[in-house]
Structures are given as structure tokens and as C-alpha cells.
Image: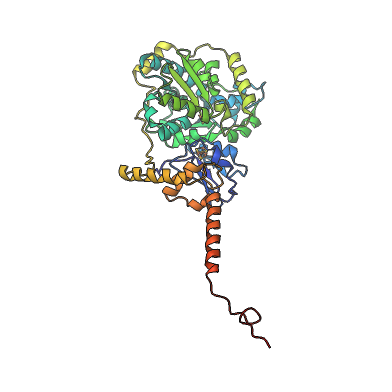
Amino acid sequence: MTGYYHSVTLDISKCKGCTNCIKGCPTEAIRVRNGKAQILQDKCIDCGECIRICPNQAKYAVYDSLEKLKEFKFKIALPAPSLFAQFKENVSKEQILNALYKAGFDEVYEVALAAEEVSIAIREYIKNSSIRPLISSSCPAVLRLIRVRFPALIENIIPVKSPMEIAAKRAKEIVSAKLGIPDMDIGTVFLSPCPAKVTAVKQPIGTLKSYVDAVVPVNVIYGEILKNLGKGSYQTIFKRANGLGVGWGRSGGENLAIGWGNNLSVDGIHNCIEVLEEIEMGKLSDIDYVELQACNGGCIGGALMVENRFVARVKLRRMSEKLGNNPNFDENEIKISIKNAFYNMEGPITGEVNYGLDGNIAKAIEKMELLEKTLKGLPGLDCGSCGSPNCRALAEDIVLGRANETDCVFKLRDRVRQLAKEVLDLSQKLPPTMDTDGGENNETG
Ligand code: SF4
Ligand code: SF4
């Protein structure tokens, strides 16, 4: 247990213990014991995969309610670029932004706009760094995966803040400067495609405190936007994002906007794990930059989205093309912001406190030997019917006292057979019974 915040949680009353989720979890963070699922807090990366998989809606994301908006005098919506792909193709970005004003926001700062300037900052960082490959910091589920499972790759993560953070920071700065509203009265609300972003705000990585004040999922704000589409237009004090910024909402969009280097775009958490393993083995040192997104298709595939991700992908691409690539930022000004460390993460990224088998190295070695021995005794079928995702995970659970050998149905069967044989052997050693109505002791005549 690490004490880390998790936005993905479990409604135990809805869980039927079906074990569907345990195989799909990329970090083997789920167990089913006594007919109910459990999430191992030190392994979960809040990717939301189990929310998608669970047929009983027992997994869900915790987020801020729309009521939280009332806490702020001046409310700024920060829509994720992927939001724009959730509506019919004839609905323009401007209409969606206008609907957000009507839904109760005083201003809307597009995260896609921030993505434009962050792309330039990333490009400059790659050019000046000798680390290869550098890894994108934009997907918090991937960041947590690296911290939990690939701590040796933490130094490959580019220490540039995500577009979500830069959007909140810029929006507050501009509103304060132009409208004279004090920082404490401004609330920035990120409209999120995923639970991982909720976690990134509540417990930021590489940043002391998030500039985002609340997170509302896309599937919650969706109905409000639909209701208000086409109801008026609003003047903004902000610029509007171009197609390159909007493209960040799908896999490949970040690299397209960076526009420099021998870069890779990878989507889907299992693919990300495969590529991270290769980077760990030193196989991809000829690659400059790797854009990794936990969701299939990128953020359009987030667990809190509404539209089918394949349809959304096409819509976002077409919208990006329509919007064009006219830059909103002067590169020289961005270079000044880079010099002033405007985009830098404020703190180091550290590995998660995960002691593995034991915090004490000697005991950890002992437990590892026990684990290997226990594993040899298991059938090696990785069937998952024990409630652990595979035999190795069950062996680990047994060593750590989270499970018993007889949780394995095959071991249980062997044990029952052995017990039955022992009972039979013992019964044969019993003295003859003292029957009263027949048998040897029955007296006749
Ligand atoms: S959110 Fe992801 S890592 Fe956490 S339990 Fe669910 S599937 Fe596993
Ligand atoms: S790919 Fe995007 S939507 Fe999916 S977990 Fe990462 S940031 Fe969230």
C-alpha cells in the first residue's frame, strides 16, 4: 500500500466475482477473492481498462461533480482536444465551445491551444537532449506505468508539463492580467477523457500542485453541451487552437505537431508495455521521441468518452485538416518561455514506493526463492480461476500471504483426492463394527 490517490475504484456490491477484469488489467493489479474483486493499490495505474471490461459496472471513476463549479467566481473550461470528436461531424469546434459558455463557464481555454506551444517546447527539448529515446509525459497512465514497472526509464521521460497543465496555467495568467480577477477566484475545470487525468490533477507527477482545480469527465459534460448546441455565440479573450493542437487527441497527433525527429507513436497499454520493454533493453536508442498513449487510438479511446473511437478518430482527423496549421505562437516567444522554465516540471519524477516482495533485500531474496518453488508446484496453465491473473501472480500472492495454494482449483482437487485417500486408508484400519442386527456379532437361534 503506497497511499497514492486512485481515481479508479470498485463498487463491491455490484461485483459478481466473474474474473473478467483480472486478465485485462495491464499491471496485474486485480485479484478476485471470496467472490469479490480487489484492486491492489500499489500496482494500479488508473488506466481505466477495467472500467471498460467489467460487465457489471462495478468499476468506476471518481471525479468532481458539476456542482464544484459553484465554488469559483470565474470558471474556465479546459476541453481536451478529443472532446471535439464526440459530436456529429457537422458540429463545429466553435459550436462546442459556445455551448460550454451556455452550460455555465465564463471562458473556455482549449487544451489544444496549449498543445501547440507545448509541441514547440518539446521539439526544442529533443534537439538539445542527448537522452534517447525521450518519452512523452502527456499520458498520466503511461507515466504511472513507468514509475511502477519501468523505474529505470524515468530519466527518459521528457520533463515538460502536459498541455492540460500549461492550458490551466496560461488561462489563469491571461484572465488575471486582462480582467484583473485574482487567482483565488478563478477555477479551471478540465473536461477529461479518462480517470488517469483525474489522478494526475489530484496527485500531480513532477509538479507540486496542479493548476487545474477540478476535473469533469467528457461523458458527464456531454449532455450539457448537446443541450446547448446552437444557442448563441460568445466573445473570448483567448486565441483558438489550430488543427495541429486539436490533432493531439488521437494517436500520432503529438508527433505530427512536434514535426521534428525520428519519432514513434504507440497506442494501447499493452503495446506501450511492449515498447517500454524494448527501450529498457536498449533496443530503441536510434529513436528520438516516443509518444505513448495508454488508450487504443489515443485519448479518443479514453474510458470516459462517448463516441466509438474509430469514428472519433476519423472525425478528429477531418476537423484538424479543416482547421489548418496556421501557428498561434511565435517560436521566438516560446523560446523565451523555455528559457524562463515556463514548461518545466517543478519537481523530479520518482519511482513509486513498491517494495516488491520485501523492503529488506535478504528477505526479498528468500521470498523470491520461495516464489519460484511455489510456482513450480502450480500447473502453469495461467487459467485465472484462482482469482489471480496467472500462476506466477498466484505464487507471489501465496508468498505474500494474499492467497493459499488451495485457491488453485487443480491444487484443491489434488488436496481433496489426497484427503479422500487418507480417509479411505484410515477407514481400513478401523476395528469391525458392533452391529446389532446382523454381521459377525449377530447371534442367531
Ligand atoms: S485501472 Fe487499470 S491498472 Fe488499475 S485495476 Fe483497472 S485495469 Fe488495472
Ligand atoms: S491515452 Fe489519453 S485518455 Fe487514455 S489514459 Fe492516456 S491521457 Fe487518458
On screen, residue 237 above or below 7: above
Specify the quadrant of the image occupied by residue 4: top left
Tell me what residue is drawn at x 39 percent, y 27 percent: 153
Taking depth in this image into account, of 243 and 77 the one nearest to the observer is: 243
Tell me what residue is drawn at x 57 percent, y 34 percent: 304
Spot occupied by residue 77 in the image (x, y as percentages of width and height): 52, 29
Give the image's coloring scheme.
rainbow
Spot occupied by residue 361 in the image (x, y as percentages of width and height): 31, 42
- The reply, left or right, for residue 106 in relation to residue 440 is left
On screen, residue 379 above or below 158: below
**Residue 179, visible in the rendered structure:** no
Specify the quadrant of the image occupied by residue 85: top right
Taking depth in this image into account, of 323 and 14 the one nearest to the observer is: 14
Specify the quadrant of the image occupied by residue 118: top left
Spot occupied by residue 159 in the image (x, y as percentages of width and height): 38, 24
Taking depth in this image into account, of 12 and 270 the one nearest to the observer is: 270
- The reply, left or right, for residue 69 in relation to residue 85 is left
Task: Identify the image quadrant of the N terminus.
Answer: top left
Q: How many marks?
A: 0
Spot occupied by residue 148 in the image (x, y as percentages of width and height): 42, 35
Task: Identify the image quadrant of the C terminus.
Answer: bottom right
- The reply, left or right, for residue 325 in relation to residue 156 is right
**Residue 417, visible in the rendered structure:** yes
Tell me what residue is drawn at x 51 percent, y 20 percent: 265
On screen, residue 122 above or below 272: above
